[in-house]
Amino acid sequence: MATTLRPIRPEDRLSLVEHLDELRKRLIICVVVFAGCFGLCLWQSDLILDIVNRPLEKTAFKSDKKSSSQDPFERTAAFQAQLRKSAVASAASFDDLARAAEDSATRQGYEDLATQYRLLAKSVPPREARRPVTLGVGEPFTATVRIAMYAALLIALPILLFQAYAFVLPAFSRQERKIALPLMTMVPFLFIAGVVFAYFMVLPNAIDFLQNFNDDNFDILLQAKDYYRFAITVLIAMGLCFQVPVGILAFTRLGIISVAQLRQSRRYSILGIAVVAMLLPGQDPVTMLSLMAPLYVLFEGSILLASLIDRRASRAAGDSES
């Protein structure tokens, strides 16, 4: 039985016990890496929660909707903004009266009033985005732990994918390994690119649309459990959808489908992309279009890359024959 992890060549023949031993060691590595990342994310949970809550900035209570909005939270925000303006104006007025007063006692009284109004203006909370609310006794703890687990999975994903690839690599032939190696190296980078795109482009627009849609008829409270589930699901789904180039290049390189067939099936591909976007979380038009656009760009880019690889391969084959 092998005692250490070592590169396994395609011609090696391992027994069932040796395969299980290798699988056990790679699983232990994955668990240790994930546990370390989870501890780090739990330690920095405040920073992670702040990052996840940042897409809510577009859901700030609109203090400028003074009369049109029926949302009590937005009406409260408008009242607070007006109260702050009135307090600042009153403080300035009492300062002017204090400077014009001839009696020292009167001047001191005006200055005290101006100080009180300035303190009132400072005490009025500024306009800020909605924050997730917790309803259960243990929900702050469970929501924090859940977010830390998702963040740990995201950080540890490249190592987890490498361990999975290293385990199945011996089953590939030498030619298949030449195809699989560059494709597998693309997986973590594409996943991270999908997560970043979803965080900066898809998630803020989707939240802005959904939270402000018909908000005059609802008292909108955003529960932490539902928001974090929605946000993490969108990020992970977009990261997985960005794996489209890997699948297309794998199919074309293995000869399962050709570039010409991909070009002829563009209409069906657009329909499939629309169905996938519809099945993903947030079935609103903004989220669907935000998901469909990059998927179609990735599809077209994969066709272009596959055609370039085919041309290079055919050119190399022609040079070798000559």
Image (cartoon, helix red, strand yellow):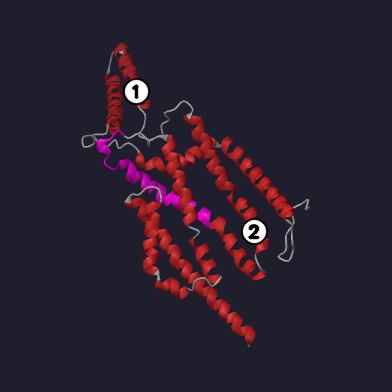
Real-space Cα distance between discs 1 and 2?
Answer: 66 Å
Q: Is residue 196 visible?
A: no
Q: Is residue 280 left or right of residue 173?
A: left
Q: Which residues lie in the magenta part?
A: 190-219
Q: What secondary structure is marked by label 2?
A: helix
Q: Is residue 117 visible?
A: yes
Q: List the single residue furthest toward the top.
A: 105
Q: Is residue 211 above or below residue 82?
A: below
What residue is disc 1 on? 120
- Classify the position of the C terminus by image quarter: bottom right
Q: Residue at x 27, y 21 (%)?
A: 97
Quadrant of the rendered structure where residue 222 is?
Answer: top left
What residue is disc 2 on? 168
In the rendering, at what x and y percent does residue 165 appear? 63, 57
Quadrant of the rendered structure where residue 62 is?
Answer: top left
**Looking at the image, is mark 1 or mark 2 earlier in the sequence?**
1
